[in-house]
Amino acid sequence: MIAHKILVIAYFVLKTGEPYNELGADYLEKRKSISTEELMIRRLQKKGYVVTKSTEITA
């Protein structure tokens, strides 16, 4: 899988002649339209947890 990604990168670098630019560690987080909170809720629900959101703030 990693080898395939490297080949795809190499192909586009050779095709366009432009240098490879690293997108950054948080690229996918910035790109996602879903909030981190919603993502965590969905992950817990997939594991079988029942999640209810509360607006009450406890300290």
Image (cartoon, rainbow, N blue to C red):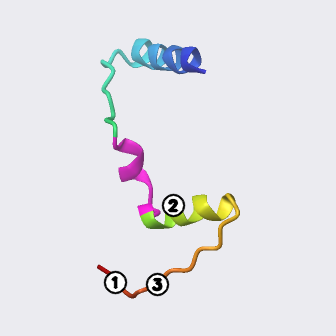
Residue at image position (55%, 19%) is: 2
- Residue 54: numbered disc: 3
Which residue of the protein is positioned furthest toward the bottom in this rendering?
Answer: 56
Give how far across and how far down residue 26 sits, in percent: 34, 43
Is residue 35 visible to us here? no
| Local SS, label 2 | helix
Residue type for callout 1: Ile
CB-based contact (under 8 Å), mark 1 and mark 2: no
Neighbourhood count class around disc 2 (C-alpha, 10 Å): few under 14, some 14–19, many 20 upward: few
Which circle's residue, 1 or 2, is located before the other in the chain? 2
- Which residue does the numbered mark 1 point to in the structure image? 57
Residue at image position (49%, 16%) is: 6
Look at discs 1 and 2 and give the one toward the viewer. 1
Q: Nearer the viewer, residue 47 or 30?
A: 47
- Which residue does the numbered mark 2 point to in the structure image? 39
The image shows residue 19, relative to residue 47, as above or below, that is above
Residue at image position (59%, 58%) is: 43
Q: Which residues are magenta?
A: 26-36
The image shows residue 32, relative to residue 23, as above or below, that is below
